[in-house]
Amino acid sequence: MCIDVSRDWLDIYCQPEGKRARLPNKVEGHKQVAQLACEPGALACFEATGGQEWRLWSALDAAGIATRQLPPTQIKAFAASRGTRAKTDRIDAELIARFMAFRPVAGRVLPHEKIRHLRALTSKRKQLVETRKRLLAQIKAHGKLESPDMFDVMDAELKDLLDRQIAELNVRIEQTMASDDDLAAIAGVLRSVPGIGPVDSTMLIAEMPELGQLSGEQAAVLAGLAPNAQDSGSMSGKRAIGGRRRQLRHVMFQATLVASHHNPILKTFADRLRAAGKPHEVVITAVARKLVTIANALCKNRQKWADQATGQIQFLGGLWPYNCQSDPEYHQCDILSIRRTTISFSDSLKRSIRSMN
């Protein structure tokens, strides 16, 4: 069962029967969708539509129905590959069904309730912080008016309100993290990395709950930090990043600005790129990608940054912390094996950095 979700309606297309239905995007409609998908082995799929699908997603998950959320860009690309130019809710529902037949493992499952609650808190906090930034810009602009004191009291009250609300959200976020042992453990691992603070760690957990379950390359792609090649024949186009989880990428850029000056390993890495004449944007992107890779590796082993002092590997002119006991392949700490692994990993990263030129 594939569903095109809009603000008011749910357009349904069922494979392989080809049945169609249209139900309201309300609680009653969600119950009807759950009844339609009650058959054993049924799978409900839908696009990400800016949050319009979350209530339906939660209702189907509570009813024990397997669900999958799909990226709209992939559905759009699939439609273009089929030569489908028309777009209606009915057509979109059928396209989702045909896409799932083509890629049955695509999409992601519903995050845990704690993650959803944490994501709602972090999203609201980000909105309030943006509102406060705009207010501060307006206060600065008021100083250029003929009567700069006209709005002082109003601006001060509004700023005080925003400060209190942000502080309250910070407390609620910390309480949510502390109430779950697993979230608290992951947050402790992330905050042990120089450059990743409380806000960065909570955003990483909320926006990338898969952290620690992926490879380093997959984590970089999911964060939108892997450069996309633009080559054809003898032409080598300029690589660029984009797509995927934009809010997470913005947070990682902020963390990277701190880590590139205060994290000893990433500072050495960033200085090496600057000395090679790389542009600032390339340096920040490369360091952000490396920071995500490090965070993912630490979360996978549930090992804090300070605990990595049991072994160190020479890496691109800096020291890469490595715990020999965490990897069964190198449980004897064979130096030659570690050196071969380091060289191959260094070559791979060097190719990635060259591709960012």
Image (cartoon, rainbow, N blue to C red):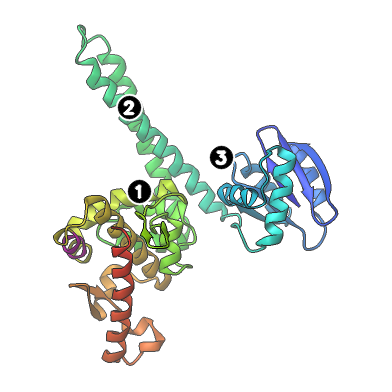
As helix, strand or loop, the secondary structure at mark 1 comes to helix
For disc 2, the marked residue is: 134
Mark 2 neighbour class, 10 Å CA radius: few under 14, some 14 to 19, many 20 or more = few
For disc 1, the marked residue is: 251
Q: Quadrant of the C terminus?
A: bottom left
Q: Residue at x 36, y 55 (%)?
A: 237
* In the displayed structure image, the side of residue 271 where residue 41 appears, left or right: right
As helix, strand or loop, the secondary structure at mark 2 comes to helix
Q: Position of residue 40 (x, y in %)?
A: 81, 62
* In the displayed structure image, the side of residue 330 where residue 31 appears, left or right: right
Disc 2 from disc 3: Cα separation:
23 Å
Span highlighted in magenta in the image = 268-273
Please identify the residue farthest to the top as the structure is shown.
146
* Along the viewing direction, whichever of 7 and 272 lies nearer the viewer: 272
Q: Is residue 148 above or below residue 76?
A: above
* Along the viewing direction, whichever of 101 and 169 lies nearer the viewer: 101
Disc 2 from disc 1: Cα separation:
18 Å
* In the displayed structure image, the side of residue 321 where residue 26 appears, left or right: right
